Amino acid sequence: MNQLQVIASLAERDVLRYTPAGIPIVTARLQHQSEQMEAGMRRQVEFEIAAMAAGEISGALNKAALGEVFRFTGFLARRNRNSKSVVFHIVDFGAVPSED
């Protein structure tokens, strides 16, 4: 199974573009910060990840506010056929519920 869910802020976003087949695509960078438990110890975790959204979800990502925190759901895939680096393909995202 290849499924990833992460709470992250929208750090950067490129302009909406279209593939030769007419599919809308938005590329972005997501920034995550959290504290995780590993081997019984607390660990500060920070990373940025390349992301993209295609199809209907790209329109929503294109309108999302930079710096805003969302819960992103999707999968990882190679950047291209010959690449070893991965890109997070966003299939859904939404507001993070407040912890009141």
Image (cartoon, helix red, strand yellow):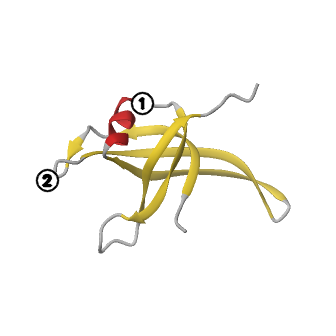
Residue at 26% in and 37% down: 15
Residue 22 position within the rendered picture, expressed as x and y whole percent measured from the top left: 17, 48
Q: CA distance from mark 1 to mark 2?
A: 25 Å
Local packing at callout 2 (Cα closer than 10 Å; few below 14, some 14-19, many 20+) is: few
Task: Judge from the rendering whether residue 96 lies leftward or rightward of residue 16; answer left or right.
Answer: right
Answer above or below: position of 38 versus 42: below
Task: Judge from the rendering whether residue 39 lies leftward or rightward of residue 63; answer left or right.
Answer: right
What is the three-letter code of the residue carrying label 1? Ala
Answer above or below: position of 44 versus 12: below
Residue at 55% in and 42% down: 8
Answer above or below: position of 87 versus 61: below
> Can you identify the residue that label 2 sits on?
20
Q: Earlier in the sequence, mark 1 or mark 2?
A: 2
> Can you identify the residue that label 1 sits on?
64
Quadrant position of residue 26: top left
Front residue of 58/50: it is 58
Residue at 68% in and 28% down: 98
What is the three-letter code of the residue carrying label 2? Pro
Quadrant in the picture for the C terminus: top right
Task: Judge from the rendering whether residue 16 lies leftward or rightward of residue 43; answer left or right.
Answer: left
Quadrant position of residue 42: bottom right
Residue 55 position within the rendered picture, expressed as x and y whole percent measured from the top left: 30, 46
Residue at far right of view = 40
Local packing at callout 1 (Cα closer than 10 Å; few below 14, some 14-19, many 20+) is: some
Q: Which mark is residue 39?
A: none
Q: How many labels sit on residues?
A: 2
